[in-house]
Image (tube, grey):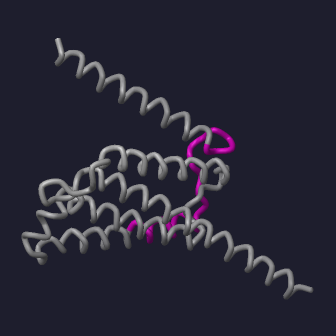
Amino acid sequence: MTKIGFILGVIICLACVLIITSVIIKMSHTDGQRAKYDERQQVARGKGYTYAFYTAAITAIIPCFIPEGIKVFLGDILYFMPLLAGILVHVTYCIFNDAYMELNAEPKRWISMFICIGIANFLIAFASCKDGFVEKGSLKTGVINLSMGILFMIIMLEVFIKSRLDAKEAGDDEEFEA
């Protein structure tokens, strides 16, 4: 009976995640449609994917060169580092080349969604690691959520920096035209 309950719980949880995700995607776009990018953004995103792939590939090789004790300490996070590094490179490249936010995106909703995801990851990390982040000489799995929370906060910092640079550039353009 418990096996059926567990399977039912997993199915209900996945259904809830899919429903919430679809609602968030619909809400984050002004027209409720899929993301729309112009040609310049598509080219920049392609370059971002290329840089992210090579970063992830190089980062995946690193465990071959580190001592076994460090591998044991890093635990599960070791296998997520290439993914996190690739995501960070792709997002950073796209943000600073004006290719990350879709043409039909609502910026305030988009930023709010990313902040909520980052905070949720922090909460999950601290809830699962309330006794500390290390157990039996290895990092707990909750550190993955902590690193995702940090990643989302870095993304929001990059968006903030890019918006300030764009505002400064727009101010300089107006000053130059006058």
Query: Compared with residue 83, is residue 169 higher up or lower down, i.e. above or below?
Result: below
Q: Is residue 83 magenta?
A: no
Q: Nearer the viewer, residue 26 or 16?
A: 16
Q: Residue at x 36, y 30 (%)?
A: 14
Q: Residue at x 43, y 61 (%)?
A: 150
**In the shown orientation, is residue 64 left or right of residue 7?**
left
**In the shown orientation, is residue 137 left or right of residue 82?**
left
Q: Nearer the viewer, residue 42 or 48?
A: 48
Q: Nearer the viewer, residue 93 or 153?
A: 153
User: Which region of the structure is painted magenta?
Assistant: 28-49
- Give the number of marks: 0
Q: Indicate the position of residue 64 as horizontal and vertical percent values.
A: 11, 73
Q: Indicate the position of residue 22 as horizontal and vertical percent values.
A: 51, 35
Taking the view exactly as shown, the residue that stands out farthest to the left is: 68
Q: Is residue 33 magenta?
A: yes
Q: Residue at x 57, y 72 (%)?
A: 97
Query: Compared with residue 14, is residue 65 higher up or lower down, i.e. above or below?
Result: below
The quarter of the image holding the N terminus is: top left
The quarter of the image holding the C terminus is: bottom right
**In the shown orientation, is residue 49 left or right of residue 106?**
left
Q: Indicate the position of residue 144 as horizontal and vertical percent values.
A: 30, 54
Residue 37: image quadrant is bottom right
Q: Residue at x 68, y 41 (%)?
A: 31
Residue 15: image quadrant is top left
Q: Nearer the viewer, residue 127 or 83?
A: 127
